[in-house]
Structure formats: C-alpha cells, structure tokens
Amino acid sequence: KMNALEATTKHAMDFRDELLRSGKAEKSVIEYLAAARQFYKWIRLRGDLDKNIFEDVTVKRRAYKASEQRQRWSKPELNKLFKHPSLSPSSKDIVRTQRELEDYWLPYLLLYTGARVSEICQLCTADIKLIDDIWCIDINDIGQDKRLKSASAKRLVPLHPELIKRGFLHYAQTRYENKQQKLFNFRATGVNKDWSARFVNRFGKVLDDLGFMPSYRPTLHSLRHTFIDELQQS
C-alpha cells in the first residue's frame, strides 16, 4: 500500500501492466485507467500534486479480427431467429413448460430492453412495476446473490409495447400469483454467482438448430448491441 500523493508515473505504469496481466478485458483496463486519471486530475486541481501521474499512461488498443468483434443481429438474422419453434407464439390449446416459457421470453426481453443476460435471468417478480402508469423492469441488486456490473447499471427500463402485446405481463402476473419470488427458474451458479450460464448454453443449441456457425454468429449479448444500435440509428 502507498500514499496516493507519493506515487509516481512509474507506479501508474506498473498499475496498468498489472491490470493487463490480470486477464481483464481491454475495455475494463481502459476504464480503470480513466477512473485513476480522473482521480489524480482532482488531486492536481486541489494543489496536492504538480502532475497527474496517469496523464500519459494509456493502453494501445489491439486490432480485432472481424470474428472477434461484438456483433449486432441483422434484420434477416433476427427474422430467422424468431422463426425458431421455441420463439414462435404457441396456440392457445398448448401449455408451455416453465423451461419453454424461459426459452421464449428471454430473447424477446433482451431485444426489447437492451439488458444484459444476467440482469434478466436474476429478476424477481417484484421487479416488474407500474410507475406513473408505465410498466417497467426495475434492474437492481436487491435480493440474494443479485449482482450488477456497476452502480450505473441500476435503472428502470420501460416495457416495450411489443412485450406487453405478446403477453409478458400475463406471464409475470401468473408467476406472482403462484407465489414465485423469481421471474424465471434460474439460480446463481459457481464462484462468480453466474445467473446466465445455463440459459446461454441452451440458446447455443437454438443457434445450432438454425445453422448459425460457432465463432461467426451473433450471441445473446449481441441482442443488447442490436438494441443500442437501433436506438442510435433512430
């Protein structure tokens, strides 16, 4: 441990190198350095230091192969995906199992909310709320093993009319009336308390069924990028 005021540019560079060796994603390392740079900017403005030791400490972004870049779903790919039997509306005389309901609702929720997979998998029935006459999903870390990526990930997301039209509120109400605390039957697993691992594996089989090639196909997380991209284009 060291007093922040005694640290030098060499210490800042060692900190960057340690972050890179830790296996953190390049984006995360850049965000850590940005936070440290902002902190030392504040210290310098206060007059405690003459120099921001993180000013010139950066990470050279590596070039990514096309297959490594986070993809969005194209319109034809989305059409293909939502024609899969597990994502097609069922006829009224067929009752879906809970697993089938999860396979149906998760991709639609991800596409129309822009949420992360784990954020949806860990939702409680109480997180579906009517606020000022608008149905919302309350994304929070209240409850056993619920986690958010950052403080800014806590947010209210309005329910898209398409989700309401497809009957999502009926699904949520049924879970609530059956005294189910969780919106879906997922559990946090492993040391990292991963809520999404089981569903990610299941969805991989859907993509296999549709003929999407591993390593060259959009993923569940790509639905978040699709949502963001559509908003930016709008």
Image: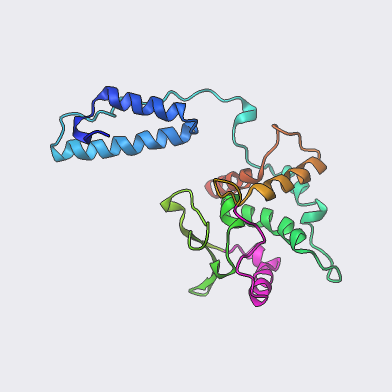
The residue sitting at the left extreme is 47
Query: Magenta includes 167?
Result: yes
Q: Residue visible at 69% across and 69% down? A: 171
Q: Residue at x 48, y 59 (%)?
A: 141
User: Relative to residue 8, is residue 40 depicted above or below?
Assistant: below
**Horizontal placement of 128 versus 60: left or right?**
right
Image coordinates of residue 186 in percent, x first then y, are 65, 57
Magenta segment range? 159-188
Residue 85 belongs to the span the image colors magenta = no
Q: State left or right for residue 206 relative to residue 152.
A: right
* Colour logic: rainbow
Dividing the picture into quadrants, the one containing residue 175 is bottom right
Q: Quadrant of the N terminus?
A: top left
Residue at the farthest bottom position: 177
Residue 135 in the image, given as x and y percentages of width and height: 56, 69
Task: Tell me: residue 159, above or below residue 207.
Answer: below
Please provide percent x and percent y for residue 146: 52, 57
Q: Is residue 5 left or right of residue 182?
A: left
Q: Residue at x 24, y 33 (%)?
A: 2
**Displayed quadrant of residue 211:** top right
Residue 210 visible: no
Residue 63 in sight: yes
View extreme (right): residue: 93
Give the x, y percent position of residue 106.
67, 56
Residue 217 vs 233, above or below: the answer is: above
Q: Is residue 223 left or right of residue 96?
A: left
Q: How many marks?
A: 0
